Image: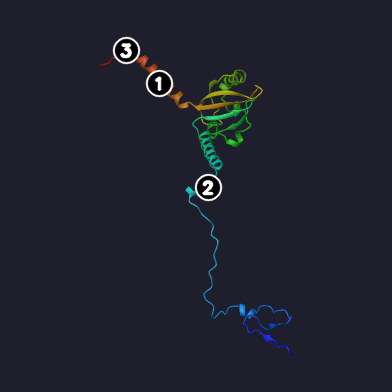
Amino acid sequence: RPHRSMVCSSPVYEGYTVGSRQKPLKKSTSASKPDARTAGPATPRLRKVPLSLPPVLLSSTTSPAQQAQRKLEAMRDCYEALYDYSQAGFLRLDTQGKIVESNQTAATMLGINRKILIGQPLLDFIGQDDQETFQRHCRNVLKKDLRQSCEVWLREETSAVRLVSIESRAVQDDSGHIAHWWAMLLDITDRKRAGDGLKTTKEQLEQVLGASNTGLWNWN
């Protein structure tokens, strides 16, 4: 009996013969592509937008360790500002009396750039008449584990004429030896001038009172 072949009339597959061993043809590309004239509106593509959280929510997403680190950094910045622009000058010196560290106030008192100040002996900035007093002060700091103080005038050629009060204290290392020492400088020029003015006024008043007792002054 002759074999009758049947051809599938599906719009998707073309040329498929029923009952034969012929492999099906590939899917028709013409049927899979939509017609641009009859197709509906295109699906909008989504665009990735970076997520931006409010500061309150952002802080809640950080770990406690990160929050503690930020607080420490803020405190450090605050202390650095207080140290640099304090009313007192701070100097760290080695055992030879050379400046190792300085804040901005001390550099201003000494009348020199802060970077140039490092490595110079503090004795070079002391007035000639007070250098012996300062050398004795340095010896006492390095020998005695007590706070030492002195008053000296700074050199006129390095800064304005200033009378400073220096308070120093040595710092020891783990082995008990002196590693360096700190010096705090306070400008007491105005206090000294005010004290001298008060002393002069007092002397003048005593002279007036003495003259009045001897009858040299006529109060009328």
- Residue 35 is situated, as x and y percent measured from the top left of the image, at 57, 80
Residue at the image position 45 percent from the left and 27 percent from the top: 190
Q: Position of residue 178 (x, y in %)?
A: 64, 23
What residue lies at 60% left-to-right and 27% top-to-bottom?
A: 122
Position in image of residue 87 (x %, y %): 49, 31
Q: Which residue is mark 3?
A: 212
Please determine whether, in this image, residue 199 is positioned above or below residue 124: above
- Which residue is tagged 1? 198
Residue at (51% x, 49% y) in the render? 58
The nearer-to-camera label among 1 and 2 is 2
Q: Earlier in the sequence, mark 3 or mark 1?
A: 1
Disc 3 from disc 1: Cα separation: 21 Å
Three-letter residue code for mark 3: Ser
Question: Residue at label 2?
Answer: 61
From the viewer's perspective, tell me whether residue 212 is left or right of residue 158. Answer: left
In screen coordinates, is 74 left or right of 118? left
Gap between marks 2 and 3, in whole Å? 84 Å
- At label 2, counting other C-alpha atoms closer than 10 Å, the crowd grade (few under 14, some 14-19, many 20 or more) is few
Residue sitting at x 49%, y 49% = 57
Label 1 Cα crowd, 10 Å radius (few <14 / some 14-19 / many 20+): few
- Considering every residue shown, the one lying at the far front of the view is 1
* Left or right for 194, reference 62: left
Q: How far apart are labels 1 and 2 at the CA level?
A: 64 Å
Disc 3 vs disc 1: which is toward the camera? 1
Mark closer to the chain start, 2 or 3: 2
Looking at this view, is 141 or 14 the one in front? 14
Residue 24 vs 118, above or below: the answer is below
Element on which disc 2 rests? helix
Of 215 and 199, nearer the camera is 199
Q: Residue furthest left?
A: 220
